[in-house]
Amino acid sequence: MHAHLGDLLIVESPATGTARRDGEIVGLHHDDGTPPYDVRWSDTGQVTLVFPGPDAHVRHLHHEGTAPGGAADPDAAVLAATGPRGAAAQPGDVGRRVAAARRRQGLSREETARRAHMAPEYLAYLEEHPSDPGLGTLLRLADALGTRLAELQGADRDLPPGQGHALLRPRLRELGREECRTLLSTHGVGRVSLTTAEGPAVLPVNYDLVDDALVFRTSPDAAPAAAVGTEVAFEVDHIDEAMSQGWSVLVVGPARAVTDPDEVRRLDERAHTGPWAGGGRTLWVAIRPLRVTGRRITPADR
């Protein structure tokens, strides 16, 4: 018998041959996937060390390929999870969302696994490989991470933020310039407000904070290029739907085109990510902050 993290252990009734108990394998004790296993039983949610008997078998949920005799082929399983042999495994959508939620909460894998009552090795597997964990696993992770099942499943990816309930006793406080700068320095996606030939517009762009300037890349003929030579507003925010909290930072200042070759080269080298919109976005625009304000919503007791 061979198993992988996330597989299902099924114990059958000797009389009827039907499943009488099943559970998710959340811990391995041997590299080759042989017993014993740490199993989280679906009927109780408890994890126990199991030495499977002749009435038990493994259902491979995340891997394909079998060796002669029906045992899982380790090489085929690795290939199914990682792609070409020797290539690094890539996380699936669920794993990326779990890892992102964990980082937002500032939790280690060990602490998250403890809260979710699962083996740290299994959590690492979920974050690093394409996987399809069961509903019970996702519910425990959502509870451990202070988020919602829909967020981990990606069911709310096309919904606008802020649909959750407001806090019972919210506190709105102003942020100082240094705290605003710290939040801006995380980089990501912000919104630049400007005037185009068609009228006012608010456009999302991938940005970085370099020295004291907000910078983003665009095409010379794209709408965000209209920011050059004007005073613009630039806004960044984050909303925690699960906790009904969030912050926003607003920057106002003049925008200029970056034309010095050395400065352009330095920005290209320091860019955290390429523009999500793709294409030949070769024009760097820098915004010099003249006015920086921010606000944060938290529970009143914080």
Image (cartoon, rainbow, N blue to C red):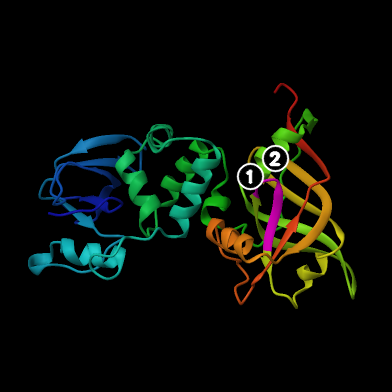
Of 176 and 23, which appears nearest the observer?
A: 176
Crowding near the residue tagged with mark 2, few <14, some 14–19, many ≥20 C-alpha atoms within 10 Å: some
Give residue 99's position: percent from left, percent from top.
46, 47
Residue type at the position of mark 1: Ser
Specify whether 195 is left or right of 217.
Answer: right
* Dominant secondary-structure state across the stretch colored magenta: strand
SS type, badge 2 = helix
* 213 drawn magenta: yes
Residue type at the position of mark 2: Arg
Specify whether 83 is left or right of 271.
Answer: left
* Quadrant in which the C terminus appears: top right
Give residue 154's position: percent from left, percent from top.
55, 57
Q: Is residue 255 above or below residue 197?
A: above
Of 161 and 265, which appears nearest the observer?
A: 265
The residue drawn where x is 81% and y is 64% is 227
| Residue 185, numbered label | 1
The residue drawn where x is 54% and y is 37% is 105
Residue tagged 2? 181
Q: Are marks 1 and 2 in contact (CB under 8 Å)?
A: yes
Give residue 287's position: percent from left, percent from top.
76, 55
The residue drawn where x is 72% and y is 38% is 180
Q: Is residue 290 visible?
A: yes
* Quadrant in which the N terminus appears: bottom left
Q: Is residue 222 above or below residue 189?
A: below
The residue drawn where x is 77% and y is 32% is 176
**Which stretch did the figure color magenta?**
210-216
Q: Quadrant of residue 222?
A: bottom right
SS type, badge 1 = loop
